[in-house]
Image (cartoon, rainbow, N blue to C red):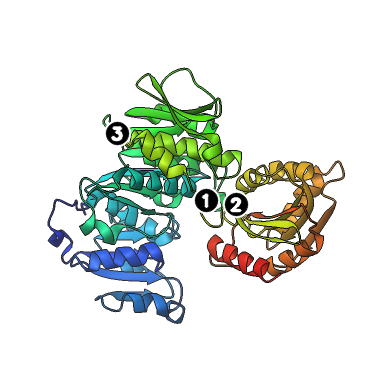
Amino acid sequence: MRLVSAAEKISEWEGKRVVVLGLARQGKALARYLAQRGARVVVSDVKPAQALSDARQELADLPLEFSLGGHPPELLDGADLLCLSGGVPADLPLAQQARRRGIPVANEAQIFLEACPATVVGITGSAGKTTTTTLVGRMAAAEFKGRARKAWVGGNIGRPLINDLPNISEEDLVVLELSSFQLELMTRSPQVAAVLNLTPNHLDRHKTMQAYTEAKAHILDFQDHSDTAVLGREDAGAWGLRERVRGRLLTFGLEPFEAGDGSFVEEGWIWLRIAGAELRVLPLKAIALRGGHNLLNVAAACAVAAAAGLSVGAMEAGVRGFKGVEHRLEFVRSVRGADWYNDSIATSPERAIAAIRSFDEPLVLLAGGRDKDLPWEAFAGLVCQRVDHLVIFGEAAEKIAAAVRAARQGERPYTLDIVAGLADAVEAAARLAEAGDVVLLAPGGTSFDEFVDFAERGERFRALVESL
């Protein structure tokens, strides 16, 4: 079935049988969008009906069919399209069967891009996506302030924008965070596509780094010569995709570079080079975000904003006053002279490493959660250099502890405690922390052994710290 565009009648969906797998955020948004356009929508989820009562209640005004507790093969009988939510693997048996039967497999992001009348900026990467997307959204909002144009920010960052399509105009700008789970299914690229970095992540889902890279590369693969790509030139993974760029290329990094357009840092300022002209954007002292990785995120946002045609003034306005996104090096409070930070978003060892490097103070580190089949050696090496007290929790505790013990050559960490869950970890850290320390939650693993997602884990951490 051909996916419809905004210029076509919504009746193109009339009578089409669409199966939506997954009754989470994306699945609910897509089910509503399609049902309101006359599609016969069947929503299926592996969870039983009683576990999904709230989600079903949200959709109670729509004529939906539900198949809960599994994905039976007969779901595909008479289906015109199968749509997968982000948490549903692309190699699910039902998806494989659909492909064998010639039934297209898509997702909410694909259908949104097909129908969106505005220019779309898509941002992906292994780390920094949400901060960069938020910054670009703030820059666009500053650019359009007092004008009819509007900036729309969504995708993997928060809520799907598909049900906002009737209100999105051709003059607007859409800024989407896109995950590898979304991109692996997509055969459409945004007009501005950014790959920030590529380091091992989600290998429990993608199995190999090559497959993970291929999924991310889809953000570039369907662009044409009129589109623009933005790549991190100092990250080997992102820079390795430069031969796949089909249109204009902008780059970003911390070091000045010889040729091309993009952003860099020099003499205490963020700079932009556009069409040979070098422009100062803002002084580094105006950036409230902590850590070298966040400086890269600001440089990336400036390059992406330039690709989208935003002004230098709007870039500066978007950065000034921005103190970060919650659960991302978020300051919680001081307790008896020790500062507590929440970096629950650090769901890979690489992201935990970036968090650790953001501090010079003595560190009490809380790490753990569920492993994603990722290497822990580099994390362990840095822990042995920088962390005074390590508290490990969750399913991955023994794996992390083994890596740290193997790397341990000197005194650090002075203590290594293994506890059951996050509450126990906070209690242990509170006993260990002294005035002048930083207590940092940077788990390196996912939250799924104990929580619904990283946000719930971060909120629980905040509550635990507030109760100390």
Q: Position of residue 427 (x, y in %)?
A: 75, 67
Q: Which residue is mark 1?
A: 324
Q: Which residue is mark 2?
A: 329
Which quarter of the picture shows residue 100?
bottom left
Q: Which residue is mark 3?
A: 227
3D distance between C-alphas at marks 2 and 3:
34 Å
Q: Quadrant of the C terminus?
A: bottom right
**Which residue type does callout 3 highlight?**
Asp
Task: Tell whether 283 sits left or right of 146.
Answer: right
Residue 431 versus residue 405: which sits nearer the camera? 431
Which quarter of the picture shows residue 266?
top right
**Which residue type does callout 2 highlight?**
Leu
* Res. 311 in view: yes
* Res. 450 in view: no
Q: Position of residue 213 (x, y in %)?
A: 48, 40
Disc with the residue nearer the chain's start (2 vs 3): 3
Q: Residue at x 55, y 25 (%)?
A: 267
For disc 1, the neighbor class at 10 Å (few under 14, some 14 to 19, many from 20) is many
